[in-house]
Image (spheres, rainbow, N blue to C red):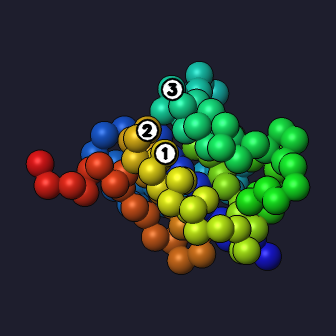
Amino acid sequence: MSFDLSVWALADGATPEDVRAAVQRCREGRHSERQPDPRVVSFYRAITASYPDRPAGPGTPWAVAPLHTAADHVELNLDPACPDQVLLDIERFAGECRLMLFDAQDGSVYPPPAARLPG
């Protein structure tokens, strides 16, 4: 069993409900036909530079590779035994790219870390 996260590039002001609705559309196979969001591209490049998914080599943190990518999100299926540093890097890259993080285990949605800092 994997530990599943996804990062989402939604409009500024998006709510956790907006993210959950986008996740549901993805699960139903409904993806918009548009160019990839630059934030998603940046995140994918950053995370796979640290943890390649094509090919996923020995010691990979990925339970499923290559990663599922779409115009507005990247799904990350992690091996439950992956190092904590992988999760920290996912959160950091998501924050740098202004992406919202969805935890599939409990449905929690986290705004980019930078968005939580006092202004």
At 87% from the left and 41% from the top, the residue drawn is: 55
Q: What residue type is labelled 3?
A: Pro
The disc labelled 1 sits on which kind of residue?
Answer: Phe
Quadrant for residue 43, please give it.
Answer: top right
**Earlier-in-chain disc, 3 versus 1:** 3
Above or below for 45 versus 93 = above
Q: In the visual, does 51 lie left or right of 46?
A: right
Q: Where is residue 17 in the image (x, y as percent from the top left)?
A: 40, 61
Do we see residue 98 in this rendering? yes
Image disc number at residue 93: 1
How crowded pointer 2 is (Cα within 10 Å; few <14, some 14-19, many 20+) is rated as many
Circle 3 or circle 1, nearest the eye: 1
Residue at image coords 58%, 37%: 46
Q: Is residue 10 visible?
A: no
Image coordinates for residue 40, horizontal then vertical, percent: 55, 35
Residue assigned mark 3: 38
Confirm or deny contact between disc 1 and disc 2 (CB under 8 A).
yes
Q: Name the residue under label 2.
A: 97
What kind of element bears circle 1?
helix
Mark 1 crowdedness (10 Å alpha carbons): few <14, some 14-19, many ≥20: many
Q: Assign the N terminus to one quadrant of the image.
A: bottom right
Query: Percent x, y for residue 15?
Result: 34, 55
Vertical placement of residue 18 versus 11, above or below = below
Image point (83%, 39%), residue name? 54
- Looking at the picture, how far across and down is residue 2, in whole percent? 75, 71
Q: Nearer the viewer, residue 107 or 3?
A: 3
Q: What element carries label 3?
A: helix
Q: Which of marks 3 and 2 is nearer the N terminus?
A: 3
**Label 3 crowding class (10 Å Cα cut-off): few <14, some 14-19, many 20+?**
few
Mark 2 secondary-structure assignment = loop
Camera-side residue of 46 and 106: 46
